[in-house]
Image (cartoon, rainbow, N blue to C red):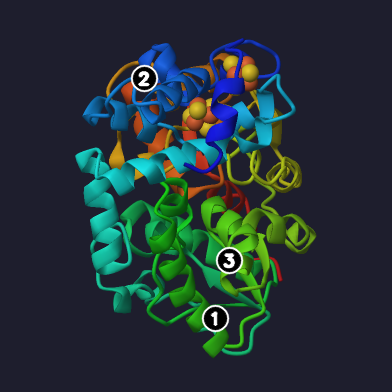
Amino acid sequence: MEHEEILHRCFRCGYCKLPGNYVDINCPAYLAFGFETYAPAGRMWLLRAWLDQKIEAGQRFAEIMFSCTACGNCVEQCAFPEFRDRLLLAFTAGKEALLEAGIVPPEVRDYLTRIQTHGNAYGKPVKKSAEWALGLDIDPFSDQEYAFFVDDAGAFNPRGQEIARSVALLLKKAGISLGVLQDPLVTDGNDVKAMGETALFEDLAEKNIQVFQARNIRKIITLSPHSFNTLKNDYPAVGGQYQVFHYTQALAFAMKRLAFSAYLPEAVVAFHDPCYLGLHNADYGSARMVLQAVPGIRLTEMDRNRKNALCCGGGGGNFFTDILSGGEDTPARARIREAAAAGAQILAVACPLCAIMLEDAVKAENLDNTLRVQELSEIVTERIDFQAP
Ligand code: SF4
Ligand code: SF4
C-alpha cells in the first residue's frame, strides 16, 4: 500500500481530531461515532495491523475506513510535520487497498457502480446533464470567457439544480461572461478519487477533458468546491490544464457591479467554510468578500471557522453513502448548533452538498424557525435591486 511506511510513525497524541483552538472534536468521523478507530490515529493503527496480517478486514473495518470525509482537518492539525501532508494520501491508499481486496461497504459499492454505469451518482442519462438550465436566460457555451460546470449535484439533484440556476443568473447579472455546457458531462470525480477509485477517476476526468478540448475551453467556473478542487489540482495530471475558479471567487471581484435594494433587512450571517475551498485550497476570503459587500449583512464567526472549520460530513462520498448519518452528533447537526450558538440568523453555504446536508440538519435540530441555512448566491440575489441598470 502506498504511504504505508508512515503508518507506524503516528504517536497518537490526538491533535489531529481537534481544531487549532481545541474547542471541540473536529474529525467528523470521530465526532459521529466516538471511537478512536474512527479518528486518524486509530485508522493508521488499524491499517498497520491489517497490513501486518494481525487482524482481518471485514465490513466493519471497511465502514470505518470509508467514513472518512477527506475533510483535511487531520492534515491541517497533525502535530508531526514530517508526515502530516501524507495522512489523507495514506487513508485514500487504504481505501484503494480495500477496493482491490473487494472489502467495501454496500453503500460505497452501489455509489461507485452508479458512477461507472451512468457517469453520475443519480443514475441519470448524461445527455440530460444540461437540463437544469432549460428555460433559463443563459446562453449555451460558445465563445464566452467562462464555461460553467455544475457537476452531477447541480445537474440532477432538485435542490442542486435550484442552486445552479441561482448562481448562473447571479454571475450573469454581475456581468460575467459565461455559457452553459450542453454536452454530456460526467461527474467531476473528486469524491471517487477520495474513495481510492483512481482508475475510475481518471476515466471520468478524461471524458470531461475531451468535452472541454472539443469546445476549446480555457476558463471554467464551478458550482461546487469539490469540482473546483479536482479540476484545478487533479485534472492537469490527466491532461486537462485550465484556469479554474469557484463561483465565489469570480463573484467576489464582480460585486461592485451589483446594485442593492433600498429595503435591506439586517441579518447576522455566519459562513460555513466548505472543505474543498478552505482546508484543501486555503481560500477563506472570497465568500466573506461577497457577503461583506452586501448592505445589511453583518458577518459573525462560529467558534470553528476558516482552517478550523468543521466539515458538514458530506465529503469523501459520504453525501451519497451516508455512512455518518443517524445520531445527534453528525457533523451537520453539530455545525447547526454551533451556528445558532454564534447568534447567526443565516448560515451561509457555498457548496450544493453543504446546502443539502445543513438544510436537513437545521430541521433535525428543530432550529429552522430561528436559523436559516441559505446558499450564498440566494442571499445576494434576494437583496439585489433588479430595477437598477
Ligand atoms: S496529530 Fe499526527 S501524530 Fe498525533 S495522533 Fe494525529 S496523526 Fe498521529
Ligand atoms: S480527513 Fe477528516 S474525517 Fe478523515 S480522518 Fe482526517 S479529520 Fe477525520
Q: Is residue 317 visible?
A: no
In the rendered view, does 292 fall on the left or right side of 191? right
Which residue position is annotated with label 1? 212
Pick whichever of labels 3 and 2 is earlier in the sequence.
3
Cα gap from disc 1 to disc 3, whole angstroms:
11 Å
Q: Amino acid at mark 1?
A: Phe
Provide residue 368's location: percent of width, then percent of height.
Answer: 39, 26
Query: Do the numbered discs 1 and 3 sit on residues whose CB atoms are within 8 Å?
Result: no
Q: Mark 1: is the Cβ under 8 angstroms from ligand 2?
A: no
Q: Mark 3: is the Cβ under 8 angstroms from ligand 2?
A: no
Cα gap from disc 3 to disc 2, whole angstroms:
39 Å
Provide residue 106's location: percent of width, then percent of height.
Answer: 20, 41
Q: Residue at x 46, y 20 (%)?
A: 45
> On residue 358, which mark appears?
none
Which residue position is annotated with label 2? 365
Q: Amino acid at mark 2?
A: Glu
Q: Is residue 372 above or below residue 101?
A: above
- The front one of 25 and 177 is 25
Which residue position is annotated with label 3? 235
Cα gap from disc 1 to disc 2, whole angstroms:
42 Å
Q: Amino acid at mark 3?
A: Tyr
Q: In the rendered view of the protein, which quadrant contains the C terminus?
A: bottom right
Element carrying mark 1:
helix
Q: Residue at x 37, y 79 (%)?
A: 184
Quarter location, residue 200: bottom left
Q: Is residue 51 above or below residue 125?
A: above
In the rendered view, does 70 fall on the left or right side of 76? left
**Neighbour class for label 2 at 10 Å: few (<14), some, many (≥20)?**
some
Q: Is residue 179 visible?
A: yes
Element carrying mark 3:
helix
Q: Ligand 1 appears in which quadrant?
A: top right
